[in-house]
Image (cartoon, rainbow, N blue to C red):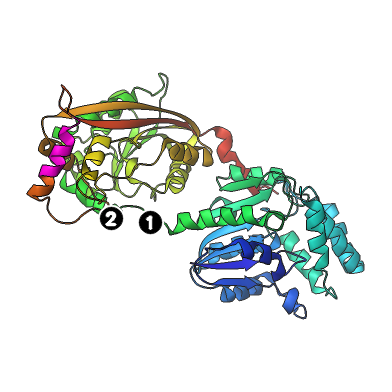
Amino acid sequence: MNLALIHGWGGDSRCWQPLLDELNSFPGQVVSIELPGFGARAQESWPDSEALLAELDARLPPDCLLLGWSLGGMLAVKLAAMSKKVRALITIAANGSFVARGDWPGMDAEVFAEFCRAQRDAPAKNWQRFCGLEARGDLEMRGLLKILKDWQPETIPRSWGDALDCLGELDNRMLLSDPGVPALHIFGENDALVPVAAARKIENLGAHVKIIPGAGHCPHLSRPAEFAALIERFATGLEQPAPLEKNAVARAFGRAAASYDAAAHLQRAVCRDLLGRAGEHWSPARILDLGSGTGYGSELLRRRFPDAEIIALDLAPEMLQYARLHRPVSNGYVAADAEQLPLADHSFDLVFSSFALQWCYRLPQLFAEIRRVMAPGAHALISTLVPGTLAELESSWAAVDRNVHVNRFLSVDDWRRACEGNLLECSANVEQRALHFDDVKTLMRELKSIGAHNVNRAAGKGLLSRQKLRRLTEAYEQQRTAAGLPATYRVLYLQLVRRQENIAAPGAAAAG
């Protein structure tokens, strides 16, 4: 993956050097793009917005993480929405609208107009004033102001005024809720140019926002090491593949459709407990059974909410076919991935998902989709698995080889952060359940019957040899109890609410 950088108004590519000095392990090519009229391009005029975006797109390297600051960040949002070259986006101090519009926080329109007039009348003096605004509020204000003023250009062309006009006209409010790529928006808590209220507004749209305490408009300059670590963590998350292929999961559960119910004792018990957490007075008109499997949960939902419209969605078409034949209680059946729901916005009053989402590893995207389809005031009930599940099997396999034999489960904190990051009120609790088996073969057979056998990329290939089975059995037998060989499951229950005000923000952003 490559890195592309676009500076802000009044700056040039020098603004990135402190950050680049700290980025020790970033893969790929690094391209710093200067805007027309700035830096080495000082003699160029400022083009119209359409021509500017086309020119910037042509300069982007392929498969890039695009990082933009201030005006550069606002242009980066536009590019991310239109360019096939952008894999992910980071903005710094980039408002949805630099000038206040309606109830959207920003610079007062009259103050901005006065600043534009001063830029045309006394550009050098106005630039000095701008440096002070950039540094204001930062704990490193003195050192930061010195750096900024040391970069004063020999002459300031009139094109800077045209660039200011562009800054005042840009309106990304609606794009920020879904820029089309993974995105992180970083703000300084004390920014004098982009109020922190704007960061909160963007966060309310469902965007991933990071507010840096004690920073102003230039956090990448005042604390480059901290900023570099943020970028590297974000980039690492983009590079790390899920430990399994969704197609392999779909095939495994498809093959298990006919045998699933006979072995899914724990799954049915958890499903009943999950539905028992529904509010006594709930009366959802539309319900999504997410990861519906053979339709056991849909059947429980139909009994509890007889008048509701129920849509069953599952990754495995064979599971849906089984449900149609044996439990035909749903109003519709959809074969799809939970991380990419082919469903309308705000269309469900209840999202119900029992023992299905542990196969998802992009939790922020998963809950962005769940939140998107939830209506105002809607609820979600979810059960899934967390670390500690099948710990006995995992430790026994560790005595046999170094392959991955138990699916990786994400932590409770991972699930909670993804919910809260998508503005879903979250109540979470964990319980431990244990099944017991007469022998290892019975345990392995049951896991295969419910489609929950090992589909990891790092799984060992080939049949289980007699020698490996013997070693596995010897290791597992050391954990035998009076009830038999234990298989522990750690179950996470999530109860989520999407409050009314959480979907008001996009409509409010459209005003003005």
Residue 76's place in the image compared with 498, above or below, is below
Residue 301's place in the image compared with 293, above or below, is above
Q: Position of residue 344 (x, y in %)?
A: 43, 46
The disc, 2 or 1, on the residue closer to the chain's N-terminal end is 1
Q: Nearer the viewer, residue 145 or 504?
A: 145
Q: Nearer the viewer, residue 31 or 123?
A: 31
- Mark 1 lies on a secondary structure that is loop
In the rendered image, is residue 174 in sight?
A: no
Q: Residue at x 87, y 62 (%)?
A: 128
Which corner quadrant of the image does residue 221 belong to? bottom right
Marks 2 and 1, how far apart at CA: 10 Å
For the residues bearing labels 2 and 1, Cβ distance under 8 angstroms: yes
Q: Is residue 189 toward the left or the right of residue 503 in the image?
A: right
Q: Position of residue 354 (x, y in %)?
A: 31, 34
Residue that lies at the very extreme toward the bottom in this rendered image? 43
Disc 2: CA contacts within 10 A as few (<14), some (14-19) or many (>=20): some
Q: Position of residue 282 (x, y in %)?
A: 42, 23
| Label tally | 2
Q: Amino acid at mark 2?
A: Arg
The residue identified by callout 2 is 457
- Label drawn at residue 249: none
Q: Nearer the viewer, residue 351 or 75?
A: 75
* Residues drawn in magenta: 470-479
Q: Position of residue 190 (x, y in %)?
A: 75, 45
Q: Is residue 322 toward the left or the right of residue 180 in the image?
A: left
Q: Amino acid at mark 1?
A: Pro
Is 478 inside the magenta-drawn segment?
yes
Overall secondary structure of the magenta stretch?
Answer: helix
Which corner quadrant of the image does residue 393 belong to? top left
- Mark 2 lies on a secondary structure that is loop
- Label drawn at residue 241: 1
Residue 452's place in the image compared with 83, above or below, is above
